[in-house]
Image (cartoon, helix red, strand yellow):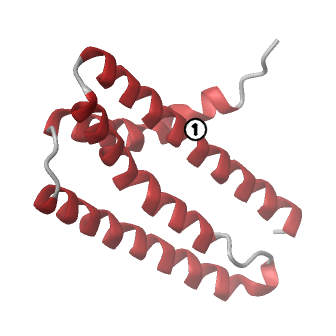
Amino acid sequence: MSNKLAMNAFNQAVKLIVFQVLLVAIIAMVFLFIDDGFSARSAVLGGMIYVLPNYIFTRLAFRFMGARQIKDVAASFALGESLKLVLTVVFFIVVLGFVEVNYLPLYVTFALAISSQLFAPYFMNKKLG
C-alpha cells in the first residue's frame, strides 16, 4: 500500500466523521423542533458517544502508513479499535450515570450514528450538479 492510497483512505475516514457530525447536528435540530432543548442535548450526547471514539480510532488507525510499517499499522489499528470500544463504554457510563438525559433521543442518535457507516458512502460519493 502506498502512502497515496493510505492518505486517500484517511481522507475518506475523515469525510465519514464529518458526515457523522453533520448527521448528529441534523438529528439534534429535529429533536429541538419536535420536542425541546433537553431532547436536542440528549441527541448530541448520544451522537458524540459514538463519533468521538470513532474519531480517536481514525487518528490512531492512520498514524502509520505504508507497507514497510505494516506491524506498526496493525498494532495502531488494534489499539485504536480497543480504545474506541473502551471509550464508548466509558462515555455511556458517564452520561447515563451522571447526566440527566432523555433516553429516546440519546439512543436514536447513537444508533443512527452507528448505522451512518452503511449509508454514508452513498452521500459521500454523490456528484452534485
Instruction: Please say if 70 is above or below 44.
Output: below
Q: Position of residue 77 (x, y in %)?
A: 56, 75
Q: Position of residue 94 (x, y in %)?
A: 20, 64
Quadrant that contains the N terminus: bottom right
Instruction: Please say if 61 is above or below 23.
Output: below
Name the residue rendered at 45%, 70% in the picture. Answer: 81
Q: Quadrant of residue 41?
A: top left
Name the residue rendered at 78%, 21% in the picture. Answer: 127
Name the residue rendered at 45%, 58% in the picture. Answer: 52
Using residue 87 as the reference point, say whether residue 3 is left or right of it: right
Q: Quadrant of residue 24?
A: top left
Using residue 68 as the reference point, say whether residue 91 is left or right of it: left
What element does badge 1 sit on? helix
Q: Quadrant of residue 101?
A: top left
Q: Position of residue 91 (x, y in %)?
A: 28, 63
- Which of these two is toward me, 29 or 90? 29
**In this view, which residue lies farthest toward the top?**
129
Quadrant that contains the C terminus: top right
Using residue 2 as the reference point, say whether residue 78 is left or right of it: left
Using residue 67 as the reference point, say whether residue 33 is left or right of it: left
Instruction: Please say if 107 is above or below 7.
Output: above
Q: Position of residue 120 (x, y in %)?
A: 56, 34
Q: Give the mark count.
A: 1
Is the residue marked by circle 1 packed among few (<14), some (14-19), or many (20+) residues within 10 Å?
some
Provide the residue designation for mark 1: 19
Name the residue rendered at 70%, 48% in the picture. Answer: 12
Amino acid type, mark 1: Phe
